[in-house]
Amino acid sequence: MKRMCIWMVCMLMLWGCADGSGGVMPDRGETAAVEEEAEETGAGMDDLMKITTWIMDPALEGNGYWAYAEDMKIYPHKGYWVPDEGEPAVPEEKVFREERLQVGKVYTMAPLGYKMSNLEFDFDFDGIVTVEKTDPADNSILLDFSDSVWNQWSGETVISRNGPCTLNVYPLGKNLSFEGVGGALVQPDVLAGKEYLLTVKGYELDGSLLVTVKIRLVSLEDEAYPYDEIMRNGNHGFGELFSVGENRTRFCSVELVSYEYSDQYKMMMTE
């Protein structure tokens, strides 16, 4: 009788472990699924360095366009939303929003100069942030941190700043001579159809690499932007920076192509 009781107790314990009612909770693949999803979406892999910027509300993509407006007294952001037929109207202040970028997602950025100078990216990172162009000698895209935008023509191949910090980007799309321009370029448009790749790295204060992020920028077509008319009616003038008949745009797309922790950081997380 005693042996029978012991046997029954053991069986009950085994059943509890198997169905999750007691002992170790069963794993029916949930853990593996969560880990796989995190790897595919980048969830949890971008907490070390958070990157934010102003983007178009993704719900509006393909449902209208941002018209150009010259009168800033009426339209302080020099534009307004024109919805497609059957789509609801959207107030100007609701079209764009500040958002943290996620790996693998392509966003349409707010137009150049929208609540910022050129294009801006905020880096929430406790350490040293460096930014480098794919081709360091390529002057068709200018980079600097927003507290020193006048140094766009410094000639440095890698720029750095202690985080948190804000990066200022002007992807003008053409190479200009230093003597012909000089100083800071803060403009409302760039050449369309250009692509740029930036490498951002985050270091500890002692110089140890922690994370590397690749950012892709693409200047988009902008049929609603009357560039030639604006230039001819204004007093901007043409020349090296502006030319007649150029295909210029107010918009760029942005994508975090990759987000990689260094081996050292991975080891730190497992200790």
Image (spheres, helix red, strand yellow):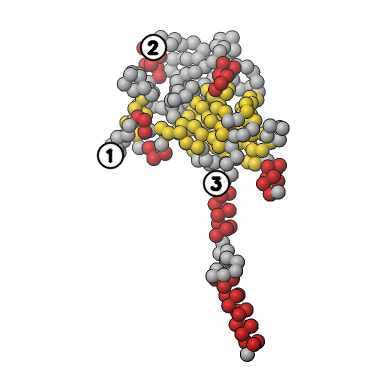
Please name the residue shown 49% across and 32% down the image. 53
Horizontal side of residue 267 vs 138, given as left or right: right
Label 1: state its secondary structure.
loop
Residues at discs 2 and 3 in contact (Cβ within 8 Å): no
Residues at discs 1 and 2 in contact (Cβ within 8 Å): no
46, 11: nearer the viewer: 11
Q: Residues within 10 Å of mark 2 (few under 14, many from 20)?
A: few
Label 2: state its secondary structure.
loop
Horizontal side of residue 121 vs 267, given as left or right: left
- Rounded to the nearest whole Å, what is the CA distance between mark 2 and mark 3? 47 Å
Label 3: state its secondary structure.
loop
Residue on which the image places disc 3: 43
Residue on which the image places disc 1: 86
Counting from the top left corner in percent of width and height, residue 94 is at 37, 33
Q: Quadrant of residue 33?
A: bottom right
Choose the circle earlier in sequence order: 1 or 2.
Answer: 1
- Rounded to the nearest whole Å, what is the CA distance between mark 1 and mark 2? 35 Å
Residue 271 visible in the snapshot: yes
Please name the residue shown 32% across and 34% down the image. 90
